[in-house]
Image (spheres, coloured by chain):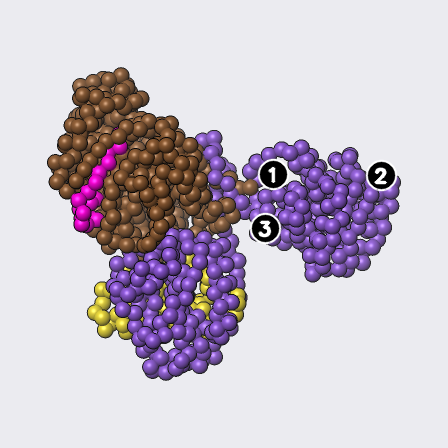
Amino acid sequence: MAPELAGKRLELLREVLPRVARVAFLASGRDPDGRLFVEEAQAAAERFGMQIQPLVIGGPEEIEGASQEVVRLISPHRPDVVVAGPAFNAGRYGLAAVEICRTIAERLGLPCVTGMEPENPGVGFYREYHNEKVFLLPTGESAAGMGRALSAMAVFVCRLAAGAMIGPADREGYLPRGIRRLERGERSGVERAIDMLLAKVESRSFVTEVAMEIWDKVAPAPPLKDAAGAKLALVSTSGVVPWGNPDRFKTYRNTHWQKYSFAELKSLEPGKWEAVHGGYNVAEMNQNPHYGVPLDALRALEAEGKIGRGKLYPAYYMIPGNQGSPAVMRRVGQEIAADLRKEGVDGVLLVAT
Amino acid sequence: MISKELDRAGFPVALISAMYPVAEQIGASRIVKAVAIPHPCGDPSLPAEMDRALRREIVTSALKALETEVETTTLFAPKMAVSS
Amino acid sequence: MVLEMAEFPVTGIQPGAKIVYEAGTLRVDRQEIVDSILQETRIEAAWLEIVAPGDHARITGIRDVVEPRVKVSGAGQVFPGVLGAVEPVGDGRTHRLSGMAVFVTAEYEGTVRAGLAVQRHAILDMWGAGAEASRYSRLHGLVVNLRLAKGLSELQAHTIIQRAAYETAKKLAETTIGQEPRHVETFALGGADPALPKVFLIQGCLTDSHNPHTGVSYYNLPIRDSLATLIHPNEFFDGVFSVNATRCVGYFPITWDWQNHPLVLGLYREHRKRLNFAGVILERIRYETFHGKEVVAQHTANMASQLGADAALIAWVGSGNAFVDVMLTVRACERRNINTVLVTYEYGGKDGIDSPLLFYVPEANAVASTGSRDRWIELPPAEKLIGPYEEIQILSYPGAPLASARGALTLDARDMIVGGVDNWGQENWICNAY
């Protein structure tokens, strides 16, 4: 960001928020203009009778330290609202702004307002944090839109400072934080559905009420050199557990997992196991638990040497998968991974229903 | 979801699932086509011997998937005829 | 087919010497109804209670909710195939007692421990947070409580419970015969305006083929692995669709919903105004293999296309598995240039930060939300308990602990409350993004 804009930025800030007295701001130490920016800002601040607290950050790895520092600086002043940015298309700035806002919101419980273009990488993190005290307003791409951005942010700041209830994102103009609230609308689902359909048919604009989710991508783990030489474990979401459901799995929305031993067993005997799962008809699984926990096939392959002798981990991991919340399943996956690592497992078969 | 966390932690995972397009969309990396939702690893309409052989084939495909280098979501199909 | 729905609104239910409907009040001879129900020898005991919206009462053991109706002209009778002959309905005139319902409750343990065939019952609070969450709390209720003989199979229990509910409902409606209705609404397709778009309702219908009662029946024939079919909307109003009366959960529509299908009514009321309502395509969903899902989605879209659809509302019944079929149907329709809007509930978990839906296709660019299925809800203690259960399992699993039905309850989803999930957009629930 051009250093001479530092003064302009402060001037605009002062126009929209005349009573702002203290401004903390981030500057990038790696940016050759960074130091110049700080000098310009300090000069401008003196002209306007404001106090400046600059924080120079080396890079993304210093963001956490900077966040803590900002919390430390801010807390004695007891502000009503904290503002960061706007960052426009500056990626490091956007990430830092979101991070700092989130830290302040979590640690001090203060509402925070920031702004950046919707494609800024900071927005992805903002959405993941689900912090209802942090508001990110969309801006244009460049500092040419500074005036507009600061005005919009200022309006928000004043409302928050006045304790106003902020409504849904599309009505209020901030980007959603991935928080969806069950509420009553003005019209029935039937009316909204028919109106939306007619708009679509007549090529008028409409807004979908549930947008498509983009799942994150994970790089595939490298393959096993040779399955016969590897320690293998079985994970299943089929719900097959020892008869009687000793660990009290629910048939829906489970949040914990268990390991069940089959160490001495060559197969799973019907009647000794049952499928605790609400999402499919379990009659066949109960008659033959191997459909969900294929122990007989694993033993057969062990006998043939396709799976190494003693290399099959002697227990299977179970969480009945019905209605499993993605967030819970992520956590469960991480916990199972930690256990697998502890047990020296190399590769996993996961049976899903 | 679980399989992605295992991948992230460095464990190759063969996900045996009848709903493989759902698994593909979510981004699981090694997916083995299973028979049907209530009985992924087998087919109760088959005689017991054939059902066991089918199960063995599915697990064998899973082992092969674990040994295969993949760049992105990859589907493995065991040799089987499925009655839908 | 032209059907006149003659409405007799009920503003109160009172016990009385005979069953009489007069000026909005339904008087009910409870003994007459109980005697009639007890003719079924596998019912050990039956007792009736009356509830009104606002009563501090909690009903447990709910298996179905039925609106009293009776045909006074036209072929056949309501609930064809269940109460009477398999005769085509949807013509003539049908009387309905609006503003009320028969709630049937039954104590039944079942023989199945888990899975899709396991018996489930629901609760309903007539006041407070629980009432707010359900469309049924606005109705005056005649609660038919049953204690069944021991050792019945699920199919036997279903048959007995359903018959008790449907016969009672019809008997109540019969009291209006000969009286003048408050209001008559006429339902007829046809007379399409060529300037308006031709719109179908594609109704996805989840069934479980493995179960003797698959979950949804048409003229009392359980729908199994069938391809999509065309249904005249008037048939809904005369009760051709019925459900498994051993399973009542918040996210499955029950008899009352099929009788009062809000999307059928909504589209009908726009017929020849902003659109031409062309009919209903009933699509059996929840195929157990992906192959099955693809075929049925494609077939449904083909059918709609052949019938000249310009657009379709797509609604469904079910859960994660069935939703895949639904999204594939959206995709198949859009690829044939049939504009669609999908009407669906969302997930999102306790705090609304989890994924709202579990599967997507890029073509699903128009989705109407009917709110969330799995936000937690706290219910206060109940002053009065109605129904067969003093204690209930809040969580559904083998070995689940029992909680006092009278006490405060914390539910981790809306499943346990009948009407707890707005399947088809009757209410104004929505999830807003914050």
Q: Colour of chain A?
A: purple
- Mark 1 element type: loop
Please tell me how crowded label 3 is: few (under 14), some (14-19), or many (20+) other residues with Cα within 10 Å.
some
Quadrant including the C terminus of chain A: bottom left
**Magenta residues (range):** C142-158
Name which quarter of the figure residue C70 lies in. top left
Q: Is residue B29 magenta?
A: no
Q: Which residue is mark 3?
A: A129
Q: Which residue is mark 1?
A: A173
Location of residue C14 in the rendering, given as x and y in whole percent from the top left corner: 26, 22
Q: Residue at x 32, y 74 (%)?
A: A265
Q: Colour of chain B?
A: yellow
Q: Chain of mark 2?
A: A
* Label drawn at residue B47: none
Q: Chain of mark 1?
A: A
Q: Are marks 3 and 1 in contact (CB under 8 Å)?
A: no
Nearer the viewer's eye, disc 3 or disc 2? 3
- Report the amino acid beneath label 3: Tyr
* Label drawn at residue A48: 2
Disc 2 versus disc 1: distance between alpha carbons? 30 Å
Q: Residue at x 33, y 64 (%)?
A: A242
**Is C206 positioned to the left or the right of B9 in the image?**
left
Q: Are marks 2 and 1 in contact (CB under 8 Å)?
A: no
Chain appearing in brown on the rendered image: C
Give the camera-side residue of C422 and B25. Answer: C422
Location of residue C221 in the rendering, given as x and y in whole percent from the top left corner: 19, 45
Placement of A91 over or under C307, stated as above or below: below
Nearer the viewer's eye, disc 2 or disc 1? 2
Q: Is residue C147 magenta?
A: yes
- Report the amino acid beneath label 1: Gly
